[in-house]
Structures are given as structure tokens and as C-alpha cells.
Amino acid sequence: MRSRYVAFATGEADYLFETTSKALRQMLTVQELQESCDSTQFIGLELIDHNEDSVEFKAKYLVDSLFGIIHETSKFIKEDDNWKYDTGTLHPTVDVNIKRNDICPCGSDKKFKKCHMK
């Protein structure tokens, strides 16, 4: 799961595609994954709960000045002896517009304009 977060954060769309279940791969493309990676700046990951085939997490992200949290319970299945992302249940969250002089939501205590503002 952490490897998929890192792949989203670093734009490794091929890895994301390869670690997705065969059924789900039929509904998306590497290009769509790459576009998602390119438009989103991930700034933190919190693991909440996990077991053998699922993980609940919160991933903090920025899209321009919009701060959000993806709160998801992801389900994985075994295919060809490897765990693959199969489905996810999103939990409700609220996105917030960050102003340049607000404290950055990454937790650095710096102003947004001096930290993650592009």
C-alpha cells in the first residue's frame, strides 16, 4: 500500500497500473493514472488500520490551492502470487481552499506560500 502512495506521489503510473487488479485495469489507462499523478501533490499519509487484504488510510493532497484528504479503505486481491489493488471505499471528507498566508496543511508550521504553494 505504501508503495502505491509513493508511486502516486512520484508519478509512477506504470507501477500503479501493474499493481492494479486485472478487472480494474480494464476500466483505466496508464495515461489516466499519469494525469492524476501530475495534477495532484501528495503531502502526507496516515495509516489507520490494516489486515491481510485491506488497508484504511488518509492521504493528504493539494491540487493548486485546494487541500483535501482521501480517506479510503482499500481492498487487495492476490493475482499471480502478488497483491493487487482491487476496490476502495471512500469515506466522507471536506476539501479546503488554502490561502497563501495560511499555515501549510503538511504540518511544517510554515506559511503555505513558503512551503507547498506552486
Image (cartoon, rainbow, N blue to C red):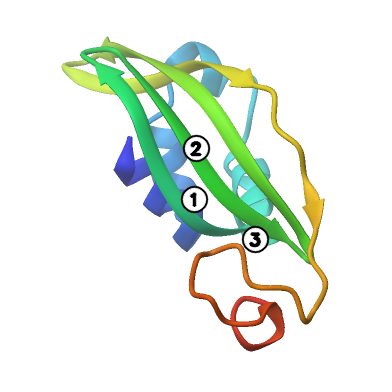
On screen, residue 49 above or below 18: above
Residue 62: which numbered mark, if any?
none
Quadrant showing the C terminus = bottom right
**Residue placed under numbered mark 1 in the picture:** 8
Rounded to the nearest whole Å, what is the CA distance between mark 2 and mark 1? Answer: 14 Å
Which residue lies at the image location 38% right of the left edge and 53% below the top edge?
A: 6
> For residue 47, what is the image quadrant?
top left
**CA neighbours of label 1 inside 10 A, class few (<14), some (14 to 19), many (20+):** many
Residue 58: which numbered mark, if any?
2
The amino acid type of the residue labelled 3 equals Asp
**Residue placed under numbered mark 3 in the picture:** 38
The amino acid type of the residue labelled 2 equals Lys
> Foreground: 51 or 34?
51
> For residue 24, what is the image quadrant?
top right
> Foreground: 114 or 13?
114
x and y, in percent, of residue 99 in the image = 83, 72
The amino acid type of the residue labelled 1 equals Phe
On screen, residue 40 above or below 100: above
Question: Pointers 1 and 3 in contact (CB under 8 A)?
Answer: no
Rounded to the nearest whole Å, what is the CA distance between mark 2 and mark 3? Answer: 19 Å
**CA neighbours of label 3 inside 10 A, class few (<14), some (14 to 19), many (20+):** some
In this picture, residue 117 sits left or right of residue 7: right
In this picture, residue 71 sits left or right of residue 95: left
Please tell me whether mark 3 sits on a helix, a strand or a loop: helix
Mark 1 vs 3, N-terminal side: 1
Quadrant showing the N terminus = top left
On screen, residue 39 above or below 47: below
Mark 2 vs 1, N-terminal side: 1
Please tell me whether mark 1 sits on a helix, a strand or a loop: helix
Which residue lies at the image location 56% right of the left edge and 30% below the top edge?
A: 71
